Amino acid sequence: MGLRFRALGGGAVNVVKPGRGGRRAMGPPSATLRKNGPDEVARAIKPLECVIFDCDGVIWRGQKKIEGAREAIAGLEAEGKRVLYLTNNSAKSREQCASKLRNFGIEANPSQVVCSSSSAARYLDSVRFDKAKKVLVIGQEGILIELAEAGYECVTCEDLCGSSDPECKIEEYERMEVDPGVGAVVAGVDDTFSYRKLCIASLYLSSRESNAIFVATNLDVGDRVGSDGRLIPGAGPCLAAIQTASGREATNVGKGGEWLLPHLVETLNLDAQRTCIVGDRLDTDIALGKQSGMLTILPLTGVTSEEDLAGCAEGERPDLVVESVAALVRGGGPASTEG
């Protein structure tokens, strides 16, 4: 493939800070991080045709844009590079993700976006799921929108039991009838996840009458939000509860699962050797890039910290680590936060 960067000897990895020279950090060899200048990032990206960005923790953090994101993406597009967005966010549809990018001053359209909610729809297509059957959704509107656009009939727990009460008493659970028309359960992050939803999902997944397909949009533990970087739980904890209660393992159609990469290569016509992925998670973004042979860049604005990098195996490390996407701005100068 094109230009690659290896971890440095003694367990060090390359770290890029926009606009700053190199200096070796003090500490044990396993925690040593060599800082590279932005020109090295530019040389790594120069031979590439496509750059794939994660969103949460890379372009934005919660509701706040990360400094330099707009300038970095505009610069890459000005150089003629194809820019795509690949996110495990299932709360939003592709259009909603594109809209959020545009609100931050980044020109984007839904055709550039792959989110885990749309991946769930594509997975059901790939297994030829019977559209005469219904899909029980444990999650937010992104999943409902994408499945409906793909022609699937969605139902929620409230539709099935007529109540949004988070409680579910034993007597009520004993009386619940299973709708044989439900043929799949698709679950993602759900900010109203409750014991009732857990009961209903596990009932359909363990019922012989249903024999439902079980799909996880992703298994991410959470995302960093707020000025203190606190971790808000994601889809992973919701899925862990459902899998434990039902005794079923979901097919993960997001980053971190086995299904997504072949789908991306085929549908997006990617040449992995001329593609780079920029993401903040070792177990999803960087793992996907390494699995495919893409150049991998990890910004320190998301889930993964310098301590995490120092403790991970050499084969799991990204090719480059940057303080933020601002390091992708040509010249590494100060980036505007407007827009």
Image (spheres, helix red, strand yellow):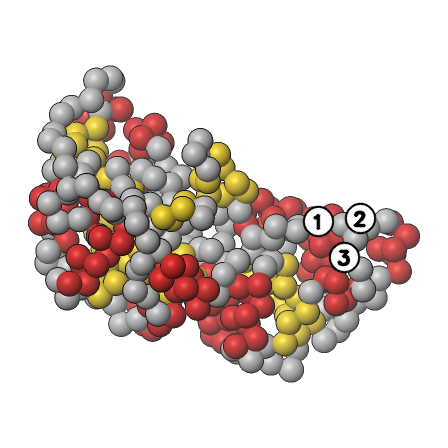
Q: Between tags 3 and 1, which lies in front?
A: 3
Q: Are circles 3 and 2 on residues that touch, CB within 8 Å?
A: no
Secondary element under disc 1, as helix, strand or loop, is loop
State the CA–CA distance, disc 3 to disc 2.
9 Å
Q: Which residue is mark 3?
A: 164
Name the residue at the front extreme: 338
Q: Residues within 10 Å of mark 1 (few under 14, many from 20)?
A: some
Secondary element under disc 3, as helix, strand or loop, is loop
Q: Are circles 2 and 1 on residues that touch, CB within 8 Å?
A: yes
Q: Please state, as top left, top right, bottom left or bottom right, where the N terminus lies in the image.
A: bottom left
Label at residue 132: none
For the point 51% across and 70% down, the residue is 146
For the point 19% across and 36% down, the residue is 17
Q: Amino acid at mark 2?
A: Glu
| Residue 179 visible from this viewpoint | yes
Given residues 8 and 25, the one toward you in this image is 25
Q: Which residue is mark 1?
A: 194
Q: Amino acid at mark 1?
A: Ser
Of the two numbered discs 2 and 1 on the same chain, state the one appearing first in sequence: 2
| Residue 119 visible from this viewpoint | no
Secondary element under disc 2, as helix, strand or loop, is loop
Can you give x and y, in whole percent of width and height, for residue 37 in the image? Answer: 12, 38
Can you give x and y, in whole percent of width and height, for residue 71 in the image? Answer: 22, 53
Q: Residues within 10 Å of mark 3 (few under 14, many from 20)?
A: some
Q: Is residue 160 above or below residue 254?
A: below
Horizontal side of 71 relative to 208 (left or right) equals left
